[in-house]
Amino acid sequence: MLEPQFEPALAGRAEPANTYITLREISTRGMIDLRGHTSDRKFMAAAKEVLGVDLPKAPRTSHGFGDVKVLWLSPDQWLVICARDKAPELAAALSKALAGIHSLAVDVSDMRAILRLEGEGAREVMMKSTSLDFSDEDFAPGYVRRVRFAEIAALFNIVEDNVIDVYVFRSYAHYAMDFLTKAARKGSEVGLFKKG
Amino acid sequence: MTGKPYRLAEGGSRIDRAKRVTFSFDGRDIQGFAGDTVASAVLASGQKVFGRSYKYHRPRGVMGLGSEEMNALVGVGADAKREPNLRANQVEIYQGMVSESQNRWPSLTFDIGGINNKLSRFFPGGFYYKTFMWPKAFWKHVYEPVIRKAAGLGKAATGRDPDNYEHMHIHADVLVAGGGLAGILAAEAAAKAGAKVVLMDENPVLGGIADLTAGMINGACVADWLAPKIAELKAMPNVHVLVRTTVVGHYHHNFLMAAERVADHDPSLLAAGAPRHRLWKIRASHVIMATGALERPIAFANNDRPNVMLASAVRALVGRYGVSPGTNGVVFTNNDDAYLTAFALKKAGVNVQVVDSRARPDGELVARAQEEGIAVSLSSVISAVEGTLAVKAVKIAAYRKGQGRVITEKRVECDFIASSGGWNPVLHIWAHNAGKIKFDDGLQSFRPDTHNAAMTAVGAANGTMSVEATIAEAQAAGEAAAKSVLKKAKAVKAEKLEVKEPRRAALESLWFAPATGAYNEGNKHFIDFQNDVTAADLELAQREGYESVEHTKRYTTYGMATDQGKTSNINGLGVLSEATGKTIPQIGTTTFRPPYTPYSFGAIAGSLTRELFLPVRRTAVYQWHIDKGATWEPVGQWRRAYTYSGAGETKHQSITREILAVRNKVGLLDASTLGKIEIKGPDAAEFLDRMYTNTFSTLKVGKCRYGLMANELGFLTDDGVTVRLAEDHFLMHTTSGGADRIAAWLEEWLQTEWTHYKVFVTPVTEQWSQFGLAGPKARDVLAKLAPDFDVSNEAFPHMSFKVGKLGGFPVRVFRISFSGEQSYEIATPAGYGLSLWKAFLEAGAEFGIEPYGTEALHVLRAEKGYIVIGDETDGTTTAEDVGMGGMVSKKKADFIGKRSMEQAELKRAGRKQLVGLLTEDPNEVLPDGAYAVAEVKDKPPMKMIGQVTSTYMSPTLGRSIAMALIENGRARMGETISFPLEGGKVVRAKITDTVFYDKDGGRINA
């Protein structure tokens, strides 16, 4: 009874059917919000030491190393993605390595829900959901951006060509999935620039 | 009536005579062919009347070719699926479609409102303003109900729209609006140069009016030459073509909106999941406007009779649908183009003659008419139309531009009229966002001039009417657009074309055809058909001093309603020009505003209806709350449990039960929505000292402190408990509604004012589920959950916190209280929230634990006199006003709001101050917001001295309690004041201290 049971944001909700792309929640990833200054060499070095990868400095990019992925959020903020069960120790390791360096590492593994869009129409569904141009060549795997998604704030990461992870605050997970389910409803395909 | 003779024996490029389609119009089954529109099929059935006019209820029929249609408006669909005011000539029929005419009662052929027409001399221009002004009371009770019933167009849908709608965003290098000859060629050129091209056209098929145009390209007629180009264009990988999609508006930075009618023509698409309409939001690097031109009618007497059509509309009926409006037609024109209609009719075997207002038109088409044996009356106009429900005959009178009235006229029997007063470029999207336009003498209309946006007009939309010039202009524009957008555009190889087209004579403006008899006495010359505005109305407005065309528009209603003056604008200006002696450019035009044509509210709403209308935020315990019968209190976008009413229990009963559980046993509250912000850095403590009115640098690690936050004006804006996690590390709690606002507020100060501070701010609200555990048994419950820290009162006193574990749960536990009871708030990562919640309930069962909602929370805090930002404060309330002046530091050098608090007004004695209220009748609960007055009078005005801010029935005290902001309240302790309520009732209440319960605070520290 007293043992904690982990419940993903969409626990108990059936995966959407009748959609032209696959939609599901990814609940196995942990997240660490990391703040620091890129101009602070000690900070950059300590972060790399723990994460095994340089923090991306270029806007809207991400770096990966093994199971760890670092998403650029702003000039002094990153989201470190790792296995959920590794997040507490990685956060602790970061805090330890960053002791005495102006920084802030917080385990926020439960703060966001990750909704994965997978399939040929994934980009099209994102164009129904945001005002961005997913046919732009910049929108390649690795791309990261915060965006207004439907009527809420979201963050997305293009994982592969037809795989997009949308990160929404946990409380909005049902809303976001409701919206995606409607946007990706079979029969509502736009077929942008598709021939034949 | 049978289809004959209106459906011609052959012809009709759009219809498939092998596929019959039955639909209903005003309850009558009509048979048409696949590809027909409501207009073509109903006309083919022999019916000419499609509706009644707005003001005079005159019978009206189809007038136009496309989106300019103003008369033949129909409602399609029944009940919740009805869409009114659709243009019959653009509505594609399908099997089983239900359509109906509008603005007629009881029927189209007999309409009781037609009496307005007989009384029309009493309905002059501006009559709305003249008639319905007085007496005042008549407006509400007589005029408005009558006008509402009589006026207007279609009926709105009833009930909730069952269909789906959606939005789509797209970026294009080049957006081409319009898929006629010019649009296709411009798109092709831009695409061949390498641009990403999106082409949108409002019609179901591309080609515009290429099929209604004279001329030969490389030996083929224009439409035949264009057909393979269209196929080729659609196949290009960098081109997306949308039909049934109207570009409705152009906005800043080449943002455009387009409405796509995805499934209106085919309900099986809806059933398969398609949205009915899709609203496109387009960002284009370059826009090519190839929207074509609309023909304008001529103002002649009774030019609104059913079967008076535009020449282009008649030509399209014959060519596209194999339908003729009648057997004996008159083409009335001031230009060469309408002769093409005469040729089409003659070829289809329909009797036709031409009336041309010009004296000596020397174009090749005029000569051809004479060669083909078509009678042409030059220097002539139609001076009268006979017939009401249908055209029976016309009178043709001699005419010379600029000269007087009709002297001689001849009567000619006919059953339809095709008129053409020239063509107006469709420059709406050019003008939506401040594109300049200029008057073109040759067209006698406006055409695009300069534009600040990256937009080019081509073809008829640009006033270029010749095929050869259009081709050259469109291709050049397409290529240039691509070059302007792309870093490296490909060179486009020019095609060798041989274009032949007839040489045309000049158009001669004809704004008013003189009529038989005194004009406007049974001889209305309609300018704006949809609003029943005549030439005489416009002239009257001039005489009455409405000099500005914008004033004339509002006064006469010319250019308003669903067609927004597509056919009336220029004709009206022509009339005004002749009435004033000014040129049309001197008069100017009215303003072009989006949308170009109306589109549905469904499209505007898109997906954001029903459960998606407003995002709802759920805590980890959301579903549990629902399962336990909670009613909701919306807090921002959150849903918080208001109270948990059990079976047979009223809300009042369950709230009372929850409150008493907290006071006597223990309660559990889902407080996850509270804002949580981590603040860290060497300057964090100093930063907090500046953000709060009280001091945080003195807070010890491991301790909690309640903070008040003011804005620069010195007014309270948020409050909450902030804890010190480490020397340089704090966790701030904000109000639920203030979480995002305060996080942004902190960032704003750090990023714009105090950039030297080394502080990071990371909002973590959603990371944690947080539960309030309050009541005399709270510690017992906590202890039962196997904490790995000492929970004794000595080790864990009020206003301290622990980080540790409860059993297997990682937690932060804060001993803080918003109820006055021994109380803890326990935070655990949200994924564990539900199981911790359940663990508390299980562990607390033996102590009588009950979940409580926000209403109990509010009563509990009010019993203790705790304020809520937004209840006890209204944005003009200071800490001093709510009796918390002691929390405003006198020692700190600066903090936000400090300077403002020194202002005389904020320091003034006698401001409204927070006090408690006890009503004389303990069972009387004051209404929230009730006003206190200095003196009760029989009726207002009474001097107001304050208002109730929180008011409840307190089950703890067994009586009502309230708080209020009252002028000079703290000096009035013990005074009884009066609250006059609606209905003359007056409630009297005594002013007291705000703390009603446990004044010495013993329970909180227990």
Image (cartoon, grey):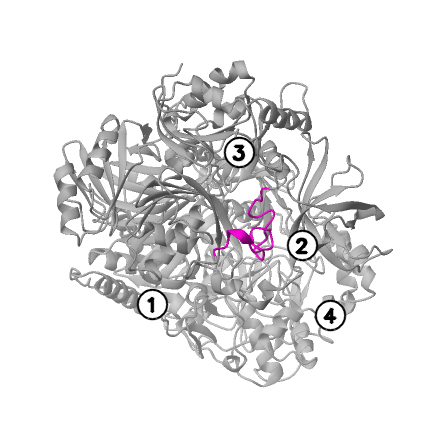
- Tell me the distance, in whole angstroms, between the alpha carbons under discs 4 and 2: 18 Å
Foreground residue among B504 and B80: B80
Neighbours of disc 1 within 10 Å: few (<14), some (14-19), many (20+): some
Highlighted range, magenta: B866-889
Q: Are marks 3 and 1 on the same chain?
A: yes
Q: Chain of mark 3?
A: B
Q: Which callout, 3 or 1, points at the residue further toward the start of the chain?
A: 1
The first of marks 4 and 2 along the sequence is 4
Categorize mark 2 by other alpha carbons within 10 Å: few (<14), some (14-19), many (20+).
some
Do discs 3 and 4 share a chain?
yes
Q: What label does residue B40 carry, if any?
A: none
Specify the quadrant of the image occupied by residue A163. top left
* Front one among B925 and B219: B925
Do tag 3 and tag 2 residues touch (Cβ < 8 Å)? no
* Residue with the mark numbered 4: B124
**Where residue B849 appears, x then y in whole percent?**
54, 20
Assess whether residue B538 is covered by the magenta stretch. Answer: no
> Which residue lies under the disc numbered 2?
B152
